[in-house]
Image (tube, grey):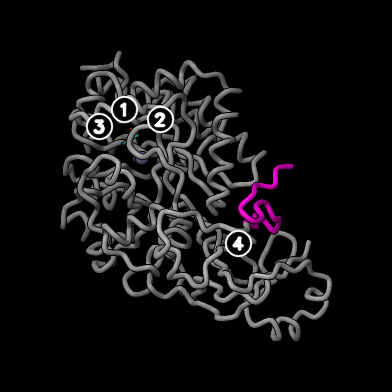
Amino acid sequence: MTILIKNANEVITLKSNIQGPRTKEQMREIAVVENGSVLIEADHIVAVGALDQLEVDFPDLVKKAETIDASGKIVMPGLVDCHTHLVHGGTREQEFNMRLNGSTYMEIMNAGGGIHATTKRTRETSFEDLYEKTMQHLDVFLKHGVTTVEAKSGYGLDWETEKKQLEVAKQLQATHDIDVVSTFMGAHAVPRDYKGREDEFVDVVIKDMLPKVAELELAEFNDVFCEKGVFTPEQSQRILEAGKALGLTPKIHADEIEPYKGAELAAEVGAISAEHLLVASDEGIKKMAEAGTIAVLLPGTAFFLRAPFARGRLMIDEGVPVAISTDFNPGSSPTMSLPFIMNLACMHMGMTLEEVLTATTINAAYALNRGEQIGSLEADKKADVVILDVANYKQLQYFYGMNHTHTVIKNGQVVVQNGILLKD
Ligand SMILES: O=C(O)CC1=NCN=C1
Ligand SMILES: [Zn+2]
């Protein structure tokens, strides 16, 4: 199908000659085309520019195109949510209430709640029920303009359930419009029955789980919760190195609750990204900048746990490429609203309106090794495009706490129109 999105007030292209994630002032260069149009053929973008120029350059395509009038609105690349714990059973609102009454996240986890509570529910939930529940989550993401989402396992902590989570994600990648990118996170917590035998569980992850993940091609990335009371930097390094040897790109949950040199470890092992970083050290930030490690910042978790926000402004100024994400999970960030996360990044991490657009498109795409295929509106890139019902991009965060998504085009097909999901 040929689509012409015409006469948008602004097309936020994120177009650039830079190869790789954007850093420093590059994060502010979002390459806006005023009064622009976008020409799409099949599943890819043909061109972006003024309508009369597209009519000259591509007369046949423009003639046969289905047109979408975007006047009064803006157009941008589909959002990329590069850090979620998408596939999980149950909910944890009761823990939310406990925290409002004075308990802490780690107290609840050490008492058998937190990740362990969700692990129990995920083990009990059938493949079919997990599939249906996750399908509904993906529908919500799509209505918020997200066209690619990362999905971590990590609520099984035993092979059968880790495999079940990854197979749900893989099945949804095949059946749902949204693109799902899988990360194995068998090292999300030490299961209760391995308490005091943590290194034995690390061996289970390395010797029993990782080889099967690679052999069954169930994930592209391997992640670990490097945190005081969970996995030490040494254990985390063993797990990430083992994944690398099997072709799984390392990611790391780092410096979320206590400073633990997770950022330093990310740079040392060549992780594509370090995630959370609420209490990352100056040294760790410096080493990430030198190594080109992407910082995936999760202000929703800081907001929901009433914890300090990551130093996003400093990281950008120090040359760390920054992406932001919902961290959607039932415990520390139960939200699928990436637009709200963008607002938190502006209000609490000192990021600009342009930087949060870069952080949820091209930089988030690079955090998933997809920066060459998605994350900007350029010729031959995937036609993942969102039309938003605001007059200019500055209004996206000005009218905050709202979903401004009007139309979503995924792989060149209209999947959301006027905010309504077009389910086939
Ligand atoms: O609490 C959860 O379920 C998710 C989480 N993993 C690491 N930090 C938060
Ligand atoms: Zn997380």
Q: Which of 48 and 213 is in front in this view?
A: 48
- Mark 1, ligand 1, within 8 Å: the answer is yes
What kind of residue is marked 2?
A: Gly
The answer to which of marks 3 and 4 sits earlier in the sequence is 3
Q: Residue beneath label 4, please?
A: 385
Q: Residue beneath label 2, please?
A: 154
Q: What whole-number distance in Å separates the C-alpha atoms at marks 3 and 4?
A: 39 Å
- Mark 2, ligand 1, within 8 Å: the answer is yes
Q: Nearer the viewer, residue 110 or 19?
A: 110
**On screen, residue 12 above or below 403:** below
Locate ligand 2 by image quadrant.
Answer: top left
**On screen, residue 243 above or below 71:** above
What kind of residue is marked 1?
A: Ala
Residues rendered magenta in the picture: 408-424
Q: Nearer the viewer, residue 152 or 354?
A: 354
What kind of residue is marked 4?
A: Val
Look at 37% across and 36% down and name the residue there.
242
Front: mark 1 or 4: 4
Q: Residue beneath label 3, please?
A: 231
**On screen, residue 114 above or below 82:** above
Q: Are marks 3 and 1 in contact (CB under 8 Å)?
A: no
Q: Do the residues labelled 2 and 3 touch (CB within 8 Å)?
A: no
Q: What whole-number distance in Å separates the C-alpha atoms at marks 3 and 1?
A: 7 Å
* Image spot of residue 110 (x, y percent): 22, 22
* Image spot of residue 254 (x, y percent): 27, 44
Left or right: residue 257 versus residue 373 is left
Q: Are marks 2 and 4 in contact (CB under 8 Å)?
A: no
Look at 16% across and 56% down and name the residue there.
283
The answer to which of marks 2 and 4 sits earlier in the sequence is 2
